[in-house]
Image: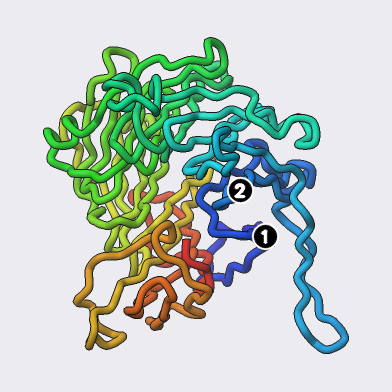
Amino acid sequence: MLPENLLETHQEATSLKAHGAVLLPETTSAIAPCPYFALENPATQAILTASKDHPIQLHYAFPQSPTEDDDGNTVLHQPPPLAAFRLIKKETEAYLPIASIIWPAPGTHFIAGTANRIAIFDVSRSDAINPEPLFSIATIPSTRHISKGNGVGMRGTVSALASQVRESGDAGLVAAGTWSRCLGLYDLQRAGSCVATWGIAGAADEAKVGGKGVIQTIWSPCGRYLVVNERKSSGLLVYDLRGTNQLLAHLTGRNGDTNQRLSCDVFPGTNAAGGFEVWAGTKDGSVVVWEGVGNHDGPVVPSWDWKAHESAVGGAAMHMSGSVVATCSGAWEILEEGHSSDSDDSDDSYDSDSYSSSSSSSNSSTSVVNTKKSRSPFVVKDTSLKVWGIGMGSGPEMDRPVLDDDNALLP
């Protein structure tokens, strides 16, 4: 919870502590908060989580705080899920792996993406009544054909979902992206069918930004443009979806050559610059900002940037007021045999989808952790969450965060 005096002058960063913690049975692959989440209304404080080999679960975000028993041991109070929703393969009855979830307004339904399929659930009904999807859409005609759809549709795991918000305020098209570098537009509110699909590999190669699979799709605040974010990419693709779904521009100058998820956020542009803003984290710990996106075609260079962390910035999120931005860092590097813990020779980082650990750094200094999945230890650096105040003067003032949490877990 952010303090009320967040934007007042501070001599040093204020400590930020977690307001709640939810224990999950397995590593989480996707999380979606309630679209009308509000701290003043406990009934809205819910989140959807997807874990391996488990149904999608609806949790209360702030369970009871830990207590101590008579022996001084810490007791965690984890209530059961509020609801559970199943997405299974009928032939084997195994849970399908959920790679993406969105819970758009007005909050009666949520959408989940898995391999070659998008499923829509009715969250307003109890799981005891209907835990199955309300309906689902196959992204390719058939998974049994030798050519897997024969080039029709959008083949691959649906790794990114984003819901368009129209000027009227209601939900519009859903943009989906896959690890196989395909994009698709789906009208789930009215027709319940696919509108268009296309590949982005050619556009990325022409823009010379690279890419190894879509990790995020995000609509502009006006709902006219779609920003596409990929792994191991040095830029972001911007599509104008009012016409022929052609690439409008590409945002350059982001160091994103890593397997780790480096997400971005959008914000309405100022009257002077027009368009909209894009805020994105980089591999080297910086946050890059592009202004006036949508006003120009071709390459768009960053407007400004600042050094936020000492490791990869996995998330950057703007507050609706435009005065506060939150950044989260966390990465590890695999050590080769004979390397010391302070070595910086390794330049490849991995996200939590590929590796897991029960340990995290207790401060921003370097620590070495051994895993069961890898014989080599890895270095954990700067796992922290920071909240920054944006200056109201002639330029941004990002010299010091107003909130800092050096005990943040790996993203």
Residue that badge 1 annotates: 22
Residue 225: give x, y in percent of width and height. Answer: 35, 25
Residue 337: give x, y in percent of width and height. Answer: 24, 84
Query: Which residue is depicted at the point 77% across and 84% down?
Result: 73
Tell me how far mark 1 sits from mark 2, CA to CA. Answer: 10 Å
Could you say which is closer to the camera, residue 353 or residue 389?
353
Q: Are marks 1 and 2 in contact (CB under 8 Å)?
A: yes
Q: Secondary structure at mark 2?
A: strand
Residue that badge 2 annotates: 49
Query: Which residue is depicted at the point 40% across and 14% down?
Result: 195
Q: Is residue 331 above or below residue 49?
A: below
The disc, 1 or 2, on the residue closer to the chain's N-terminal end is: 1
Q: Is residue 380 above or below residue 90?
A: below
Query: Which residue is depicted at the point 14% across and 36% down?
Result: 205
* Residue kind at label 2, given as amino acid type: Thr
For the question of whether residue 12 can be seen, the reply is no
Could you say which is closer to the camera, residue 159 or residue 93?
93
Query: Which residue is depicted at the point 47% across and 37% down?
Result: 114
Q: Secondary structure at mark 1?
A: loop
> From the viewer's perspective, is 83 left or right of 232?
right
> From the viewer's perspective, is 139 left or right of 104?
left
Classify mark 2: residues with Cα within 10 Å, few (<14), some (14-19) or many (20+): many
Specify the quadrant that holds the N terminus.
Answer: bottom right
Q: Is residue 376 above or below residue 308?
A: below
